[in-house]
Amino acid sequence: VMGAGPPMLLVHGTGASTHSWRDLAPRLARRFTVLAPDLPGHGFTSAAPEAGMSMPGMVDGLRALLRALDATPQWVVGHSAGAAILARGCLDGAWRPRAFFSLNGALLPLG
């Protein structure tokens, strides 16, 4: 968590970590409260139980984290699989941001 202002959630892709945002997050933190967690099994986290490693499980984990932080992101930004997780959360009503940004989102099924 860094910065001050309206909350913005940044979610990295598979095989990445919060470090994906190392250059962008400080710039965004000038105007927003940036929330950039490591997904389960990535970066500095351990793997969740099997159900928590699925897309719905990661949505549930992020929802629980946001609840614990008492944060309601107004903007959500996802890279690669992070975009797919955020899109699923938007569709499921886990969060209702003003805008959803996908950076090279992995939004199509793999061939």
Image: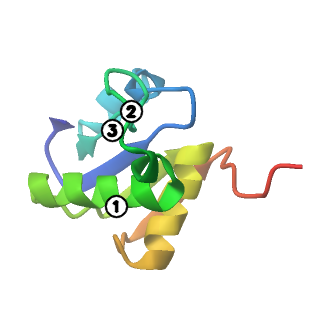
Q: Residues within 10 Å of mark 1 (few under 14, many from 20)?
A: some
| Residue 18, quarter of the rendered image | top left
* 94 up-or-down from 34: above or below: below
- Residue beneath disc 1: 60
Whether label 1 touches label 2, CB < 8 Å: no
Mark 3 or 1: in front is 1
| Quadrant in which the N terminus is drawn | top left
Q: Nearer the viewer, residue 31 or 64?
A: 64
Q: Residues within 10 Å of mark 2 (few under 14, many from 20)?
A: few
Residue furthest front as drawn: 50
Circle nearer the N terminus (1, 2): 2
Q: Which kind of residue does numbered mark 2 sit on?
A: Ala
* 51 up-or-down from 37: above or below: below
Q: Secondary structure at mark 3?
A: helix
Q: Residues within 10 Å of mark 3 (few under 14, many from 20)?
A: some
User: Residue 48: image x %, image y %?
Assistant: 36, 40
Seen at 11% across and 54% down, the residue is: 68
Q: Which kind of residue does numbered mark 1 sit on?
A: Asp
- Residue beneath disc 3: 28
* 78 up-or-down from 25: above or below: below
User: Residue 89: image x %, image y %?
Assistant: 44, 67
Q: Secondary structure at mark 1?
A: helix
Residue 34 horizontal side relative to residue 70, left or right: right
- Residue beneath disc 2: 47
Alpha carbons under labels 3 and 1: distance apart: 25 Å
Give the colour scheme shown.
Answer: rainbow
Q: Which kind of residue does numbered mark 3 sit on?
A: Leu
Mark 3 or 2: in front is 2
Circle nearer the N terminus (3, 2): 3
Alpha carbons under labels 1 and 2: distance apart: 14 Å
| Residue 36, quarter of the rendered image | top left
Circle nearer the N terminus (3, 1): 3
